[in-house]
């Protein structure tokens, strides 16, 4: 499937594609990141802290993805907050 076609699909259409392909699918919510960041000594007191926080999030999420790959996962579909993305997403 072309990437542009994939991006045009609704969540339901993506789920149907995965089911029709016989793929096992997990949904993982990566929530609570601010509290985890603060618990590890991070600060969110000023404007300059935001970039450091986003870098911490990216590293934490990459660790989750690497663990999933090590367990045999072959495809990860993720929705990410990209600080440099100024598009409609």
Image: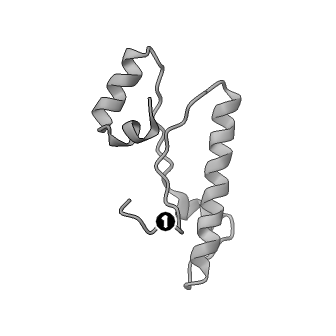
Q: Nearer the viewer, residue 14 or 37?
A: 14
Q: Residue at x 33, y 41 (%)?
A: 8
Image: 51 above or below 57: below
Work out which quarter of the rendered image holds the N terminus and state it. Answer: top left
- State the count of labels: 1
Task: Where is residue 56? Give x, y as percent.
Answer: 65, 63
Q: Residue at x 67, y 26 (%)?
A: 71
User: Colour scheme in the image?
Assistant: one colour
Residue at the spot of label 1: 85
**Location of residue 67 (image quadrant):** top right
Regarding mark 1 in the picture, which secondary structure is present there? loop
Q: Residue at x 30, y 30 (%)?
A: 13
Image: 18 above or below 14: above
Q: Residues within 10 Å of mark 1 (few under 14, many from 20)?
A: few
Work out which quarter of the rendered image holds the C terminus and state it. Answer: bottom left
Q: Nearer the viewer, residue 63 or 38?
A: 63
**37 horizontally vs 15: left or right:** right
Image: 10 above or below 46: above
Task: Where is residue 20? Give x, y as percent.
Answer: 37, 16
**Location of residue 41 (image quadrant):** bottom right
Q: Residue at x 38, y 42 (%)?
A: 7
**78 horizontally vs 14: left or right:** right
Task: Where is residue 23? Give x, y as percent.
Answer: 47, 19
Task: Where is residue 47? Give x, y as percent.
Answer: 55, 84
């Amino acid at each position: 499937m072309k990437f542009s076609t994939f991006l045009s699909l609704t969540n339901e259409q993506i789920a149907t594609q995965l089911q029709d392909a016989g793929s096992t699918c997990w949904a993982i919510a990566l929530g609570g990141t601010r509290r985890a960041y603060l618990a590890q000594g991070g600060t969110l007191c000023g404007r300059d802290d935001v970039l450091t926080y986003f870098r911490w999030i990216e590293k934490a999420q990459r660790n989750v993805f690497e663990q999933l790959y090590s367990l045999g996962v072959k495809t990860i579909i993720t929705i990410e907050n990209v600080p440099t993305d100024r598009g409609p997403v």
